[in-house]
Image (spheres, coloured by chain):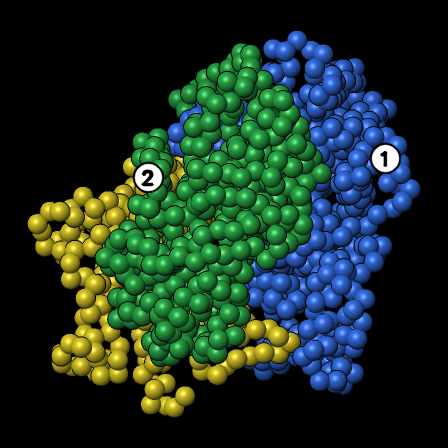
Chain colours: A blue, B green, C yellow
């Protein structure tokens, strides 16, 4: 294991590529706009227009355009050029293209959603080293939090309780609250005694955790019963302006579920934790499928509202958006803002006390504990933080889709997010964002366009690219990992570990930002993401 | 390496082909799962639709249109389906859509297509809320849950004389929605419900079979697809339970017999697709399908074919109304609600104001000794007209 | 419901759970073997096992019209499946895992997922060329007849089972017997042969084992061969018991089997078996909870029935791991493989 060498590489003289960056950005923006704007296409010679209209070409153009953001981030260029390219691309060109083709906006929002999920999972897996295979559950919690309240479902729930329960709401609510407080306090007490894992402590812990869950359930049930009288007023959900409140509530809900899931299992290590989180992720999905009273089960919830800001809508209308596009256009900017906040939070966390505690735990749990890092608490915070990012994006997802059902939260999605994180570069903020973008573009835009472009050929299904998406995706996944096991944009430490013999003077540029929101990093990252130490591997789930 | 070069060649070919066509290109699209675990069902839909398109290419050519079908893959995932729908909305040469397999995909995709007035005809979604949302562009050729469910329930009570029924579903919107309607109808007739549960299991049904053996119902209603129910019914019969099993149009497949073997005896299902021997054209379509794809046509293939035919006749009507010029999407959307589509394997289709079929003949089919035969027919009507 | 009806019912549920458990157990062994030497969750194992099931299907299909003893056909199917799955597993290790021996542990996990996606589609494509998707085993006659059902008159255990209304089929007995034989063989190989000692040594410490003159890469390949062969066996048993497989049907049992391996203590052979059996029984018991009057309905959680089977098993896993963090038979210094 390499020793930690803080400090950056000696700066390498790379040519300034401001001009190239701007030229590329102009070319790709022009291509994108032309290929999406049918009135401009009509003026081109028909052969060229047909070429640009080809789904594969259109998808490549879009990818090329998005790649500009990466260039703006990676290349050595003046700050103003970077800001100009990043800002104009995100705030002007992309919405413009999205006006003519909503699938561009849809793709951008999907990338944003997955980028936030990857950043959240990156905290859990990349920083704290806890392999979570059920991460999509938190996304589901967020989506259902808004889905239930932002649609007529809440009215149905309340009507159900109005018709079917005795009038003992206050008793249930107070009982639940008391149980909640008592068990929470006892959990804390047990943890304080903790350290030694005696059977009695374990039992007590389990019992208290169970009590906590029941307490929460009872409290919620009591509150629902109390609110049942208002069922009539909620037949089309709460006022859409509560959307903002629910962004916060979803964070809280997802974080609490994170803590609830984390409490019983965080004493486990490595792959024991992986399989348990996988299982609990499935538990959430199956509950969503089975608790029809609340979630409408497999039928799903629809239509789900979204906030609408009048001045924003009139602005959108003024620049030529049609009313049905307002909500996507609006959500696009909400996603941008949330992503910016999440990136900032991640950067702060990286350097904070808790961030270093996570890294310490990942590197050596016992040493970290010996240094006074409270294990369970620190891990719980990692779980809750990661979960909260997923929760807030769940709300966006529900609002964007207007429909949610358990099919959206299957195990494959968790695995997909994990592959984004690893593909991009564990522990590296720009890396996981890039990973999310690459995987999402592949899955939603590039690979499907292969099939669309060849549709007229009438290929047999065995060789029809439309049917081979998973195969191609799997191949890309394997190839990328084989050729760049450290990820696309690894963090500094990771890269050094993977390429000890290589020339140390890699093209490390002072790093600015994807969209101009990030401050230059001082490149003194002192962690190696996700690399479990040999000793860690040996221990299995043990307590040694 | 070889594969990539073939791929590159085909892509290149398609690019030049696309550029070479002189006629006005007119496309319809299909959205269904083409990869992943449900790809078998989704491919049937796409292939069936392709077959119908092939039939109509010549007719469209006469009008000066170059007709083609583009198959979009939704991977049975709502978000992927929505993304595909938005792409379709942006490609103005696509006038209408055949799809989808899962109502979880149909609901958000049709909502995404609605503002661009892209008409959608579903070959498979039976869930009530697919059309109950009142979207102008959403139509379906299959019977609603609240038509199929009571039909199955009535059949069990009147023909099978069942006094107690065990209800099972596959925990999808299709199976669960269907069984909910069956349950309602059975309870109205005071039939005992011996059990009512769902399972996502595809292979192991031992616990459920034990419970069925214990509760001794007169019949089983299973809302689901043949690839699950076939496995179930085989294991059920092996355990010596021979009571009748009734299901919805998800059982409409020869594969039911292949998978279930002898177990598929005493199985009944409701569907709007006419039995193959009742219609001479059905045989022709089945032959064309197996010749083109090397597989036998199954229920979803038939529905895909029918849905595409409705779409194409709708487009033709819109073109006719537009003086044989390329119709707009709005015109196609309106025409879809007006068209009286004929020559289908599931009878004549005409949509009501909600996009449901005004009236349809529902067939109750039975499987015995590996042979499908017609048990009885009844007429179903849409709740509103 | 009275005890006289319930007791035999429960015995039946447990017995069918055990049969199920044996299938899980053999799949779980494939996971645990690979985990033992590489600490890698081999996500591609579910496709290795489906490959076995497909090869078994093809053998039975080709031999369907052939006059031949049914058990001989089964033997052929098993051998062919073992060879195919074993070789496939070696190939996977060579191409997707070996180049990443020194990469962070999550990297081979992702390649495993990639390989799994590739194999799913490849299997679908290959069978698709013949117009098939769902593959239904064409078993020799007699395999599906009751071994000792209520109707048959036989002695001993069979009589007892028949008396309480439980019918085991011949093929279920075959599943159990084949599973037991492979377990015994594996146990002998790992614990009583030189090769087995080498495997254990590599599992313990790859580097030191290398210093002792063991060809670590060779041993790892061998482990993948054995794990794959077990996957092949389990594939055929799966097809035998449930009748139908397709390219994607490995995923669910794969997850359950991996859960079983963890439940028993990952890396431990007896653990995987115990885990599989326990999980099989628990799944079945959860599936019948509503019959037992366990209709839990706090806050309209619905009735606990077969839709909770899978997650019920996970919750049991959580409970067990809270008290035994290394699984049922795992020790802190797990004796791997």
Find residue A485 and report its image quarter. Answer: top right
Toward the viewer: B229 or C207? B229
Asked if both marks, 1 and 2, belong to the same chain, the answer given is: no
Residue sticking out furthest to the top: A45
Q: Residue at x 60, y 48 (%)?
A: B352
Question: In screen coordinates, is B373 left or right of A324?
Answer: left
Q: Is residue C3 above or below residue B96?
A: below
Find residue A222 and report its image quarter. Answer: bottom right
The quadrant in which the N terminus of chain B is found is top left
Find residue A317 and name its label: 1
Q: Say if mark 1 contacts mark 2, CB within 8 Å.
A: no
Could you tell me if residue B12 is visible in this image?
A: no
Q: Residue at x 36, y 65 (%)?
A: B245
Q: Residue at x 44, y 32 (%)?
A: B52
Toward the viewer: A452 or B253? B253
Toward the viewer: C288 or C96? C288
Label 1: chain letter: A
Could you tell me if residue B155 is visible in this image?
A: yes
Q: Is residue A175 above or below residue C98?
A: below
Position in image of residue C257 (x %, y %): 41, 59
Residue sticking out furthest to the right: A311
Distance from Cα at disc 1 to Cα at disc 2: 55 Å
Find residue B280 and name its label: 2
Question: In screen coordinates, is A233 left or right of B70?
Answer: right
Q: Is residue A122 above or below residue C185?
A: above
Position in image of residue B157 (x %, y %): 41, 71
- Dot 1: within a 10 Å radius of its alpha carbon, few (fewer than 14), some, or many (20 or more) residues? some
Position in image of residue C125 (x %, y %): 37, 36
Which element type, helix, strand or loop, lies under badge 1?
helix
């Amino acid at each position: 294991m390499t020793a930690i060498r803080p400090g950056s590489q000696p700066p390498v003289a790379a040519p300034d590529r401001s001009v190239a960056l701007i030229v590329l950005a102009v070319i790709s923006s022009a291509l994108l706009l032309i290929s999406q704007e049918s009135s401009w296409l009509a003026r081109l010679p028909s052969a060229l227009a047909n070429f640009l209209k080809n789904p594969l070409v259109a998808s490549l153009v879009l990818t090329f355009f998005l790649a500009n953001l990466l260039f703006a981030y990676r290349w050595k260029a003046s700050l103003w050029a970077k800001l100009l390219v990043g800002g104009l691309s995100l705030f002007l060109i992309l919405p413009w293209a999205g006006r003519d083709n909503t699938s561009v906006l849809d793709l951008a929002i999907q990338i944003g959603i997955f980028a936030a999920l990857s950043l959240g999972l990156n905290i859990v897996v990349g920083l704290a080293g806890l392999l979570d295979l059920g991460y999509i559950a938190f996304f589901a919690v967020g989506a259902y939090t808004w889905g239930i309240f932002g649609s007529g479902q809440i009215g149905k729930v309340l009507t159900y309780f109005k018709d079917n329960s005795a009038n003992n709401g206050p008793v249930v609510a107070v009982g639940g609250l008391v149980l909640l407080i008592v068990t929470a306090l006892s959990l804390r007490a047990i943890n304080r005694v903790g350290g030694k894992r005696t059977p009695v402590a374990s039992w007590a812990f389990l019992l208290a955790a169970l009590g906590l869950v029941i307490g929460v359930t009872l409290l919620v049930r009591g509150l629902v019963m109390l609110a049942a009288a208002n069922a009539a007023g909620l037949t089309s959900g709460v006022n859409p302006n509560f959307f903002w409140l629910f962004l916060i509530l979803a964070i809280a809900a997802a974080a609490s579920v994170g803590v609830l899931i984390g409490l019983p299992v965080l004493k486990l290590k490595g792959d024991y934790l992986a399989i348990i989180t996988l299982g609990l992720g499935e538990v959430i999905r199956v509950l969503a499928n089975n608790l029809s009273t609340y979630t409408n089960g497999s039928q799903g919830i629809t239509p789900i509202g979204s906030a609408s800001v009048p001045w924003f809508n009139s602005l959108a209308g003024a620049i030529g958006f049609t009313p049905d596009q307002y909500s996507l256009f609006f959500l696009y900017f909400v996603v941008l803002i949330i992503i910016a906040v999440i990136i900032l939070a991640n950067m702060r966390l990286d350097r904070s006390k808790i961030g270093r505690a996570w890294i310490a735990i990942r590197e050596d749990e016992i040493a970290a504990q010996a240094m006074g890092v409270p294990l369970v608490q620190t891990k719980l915070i990692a779980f809750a933080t990661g979960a909260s990012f997923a929760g807030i994006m769940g709300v966006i997802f529900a609002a964007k889709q207007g429909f949610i059902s358990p099919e959206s939260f299957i195990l494959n999605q968790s695995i997909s997010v994990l592959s984004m994180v690893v593909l991009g570069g564990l522990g590296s903020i720009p890396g996981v964002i890039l990973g999310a973008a690459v995987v999402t573009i592949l899955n939603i835009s590039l690979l499907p366009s292969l099939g669309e472009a060849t549709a007229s050929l009438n290929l047999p299904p065995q060789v029809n690219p439309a049917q081979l998406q998973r195969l191609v995706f799997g191949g890309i996944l394997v190839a990328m990992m084989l050729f760049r096991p450290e990820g696309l944009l690894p963090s500094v430490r990771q890269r050094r570990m993977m390429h000890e013999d290589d020339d140390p003077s890699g093209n490390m540029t002072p790093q600015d930002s994807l969209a101009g929101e990030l401050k230059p990093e001082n490149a003194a990252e002192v962690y190696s993401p996700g690399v479990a130490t040999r000793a860690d591997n040996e221990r299995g789930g043990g307590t040694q | 390496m070889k594969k990539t070069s073939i791929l590159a060649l085909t892509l290149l070919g398609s690019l030049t082909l696309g550029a070479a066509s002189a006629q006005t290109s007119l496309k319809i699209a299909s959205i269904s799962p083409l990869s992943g675990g449900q790809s078998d069902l989704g491919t049937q839909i796409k292939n069936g639709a392709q077959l119908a398109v092939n039939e109509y290419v010549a007719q469209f050519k006469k009008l000066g249109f170059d007709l083609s079908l583009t198959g979009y893959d939704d991977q049975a995932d709502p978000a992927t389906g929505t993304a595909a729908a938005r792409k379709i909305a942006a490609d103005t040469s696509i006038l209408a859509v055949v799809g989808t397999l899962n109502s979880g995909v149909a609901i958000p995709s049709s909502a995404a297509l609605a503002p661009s007035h892209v008409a959608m005809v579903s070959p498979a979604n039976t869930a009530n809320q697919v059309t109950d949302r009142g979207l102008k562009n959403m139509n379906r050729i299959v019977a609603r849950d609240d038509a199929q469910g009571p039909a199955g329930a009535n059949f069990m009570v009147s023909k099978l004389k069942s006094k107690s029924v065990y209800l099972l579903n596959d925990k999808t919107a299709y199976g669960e929605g269907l069984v909910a309607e069956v349950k309602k109808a059975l309870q109205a007739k005071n039939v005992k419900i011996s059990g009512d549960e769902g399972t996502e299991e595809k292979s192991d049904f031992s616990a459920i079979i034990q419970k069925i053996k214990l509760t001794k119902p007169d019949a089983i209603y299973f809302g689901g697809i043949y690839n699950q129910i076939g496995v179930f019914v085989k294991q059920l019969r092996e355990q010596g339970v021979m009571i009748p099993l009734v299901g919805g149009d998800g059982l409409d497949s020869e594969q039911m017999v292949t998978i279930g073997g002898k177990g598929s005896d005493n199985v009944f299902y409701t569907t709007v697709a006419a039995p193959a021997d009742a219609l001479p054209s059905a045989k022709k379509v089945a032959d064309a399908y197996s010749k083109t794809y090397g597989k036998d046509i199954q229920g979803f293939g038939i529905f895909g074919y029918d849905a595409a035919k409705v779409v194409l006749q709708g487009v033709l009507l819109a073109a006719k109304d537009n003086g044989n010029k390329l119709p707009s999407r709005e015109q196609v959307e309106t025409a879809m609600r007006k068209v009286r589509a004929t020559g289908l394997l599931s009878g004549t289709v005409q949509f009501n104001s909600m996009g449901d079929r005004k009236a349809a003949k529902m067939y109750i089919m039975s499987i015995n000794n590996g042979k499908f035969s017609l048990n009885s027919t009844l007429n179903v009507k849409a709740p509103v007209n | 419901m009275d005890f006289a009806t319930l007791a035999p019912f429960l015995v039946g549920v447990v017995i069918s759970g055990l049969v199920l458990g044996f299938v899980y157990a053999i799949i779980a062994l494939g996971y645990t073997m690979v985990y033992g030497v590489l600490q890698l969750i081999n996500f591609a194992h579910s496709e290795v096992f489906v490959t076995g099931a497909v090869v078994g299907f093809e053998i039975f299909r080709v031999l369907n019209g052939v006059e031949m003893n049914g058990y001989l056909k089964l033997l052929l199917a098993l051998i062919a499946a073992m060879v195919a799955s074993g070789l496939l597993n070696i190939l996977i290790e060579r191409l997707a895992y070996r180049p990443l021996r020194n990469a962070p542990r999550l990297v081979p996990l992702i390649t495993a997922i990639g390989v799994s996606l590739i194999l799913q589609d490849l299997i679908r494509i290959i069978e698709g060329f013949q117009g098939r998707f769902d593959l239904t085993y064409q078993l020799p006659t007699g395999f599906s007849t009751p071994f000792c059902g209520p109707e048959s008159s036989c002695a001993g255990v069979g009589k007892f089972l028949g008396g309480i209304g439980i019918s085991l089929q011949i093929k279920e007995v075959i599943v159990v017997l084949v599973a037991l034989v492979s377990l015994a063989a594996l146990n002998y190989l790992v614990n009583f042969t030189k090769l087995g000692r080498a495997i254990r040594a590599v599992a313990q410490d790859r580097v030191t084992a290398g210093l002792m003159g063991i060809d670590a890469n060779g041993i790892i390949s061998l482990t993948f061969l054995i794990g794959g062969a077990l996957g092949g066996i389990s594939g055929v048993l799966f097809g035998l018991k449930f009748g139908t497989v397709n390219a994607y049907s490995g995923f669910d049992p794969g997850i359950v089997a991996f859960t079983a391996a963890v439940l028993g203590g990952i890396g431990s052979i007896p653990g995987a078996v115990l885990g599989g059996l326990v999980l099989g029984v628990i799944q079945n018991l959860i599936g019948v909870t509503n019959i037992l009057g366990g209709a839990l309905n706090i806050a309209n959680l619905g009735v606990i029935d077969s839709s909770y089977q899978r997650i019920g098993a996970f919750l049991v896993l959580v409970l067990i791991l809270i008290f035994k963090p290394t699984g049922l038979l795992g020790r802190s210094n797990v004796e791997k493989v």
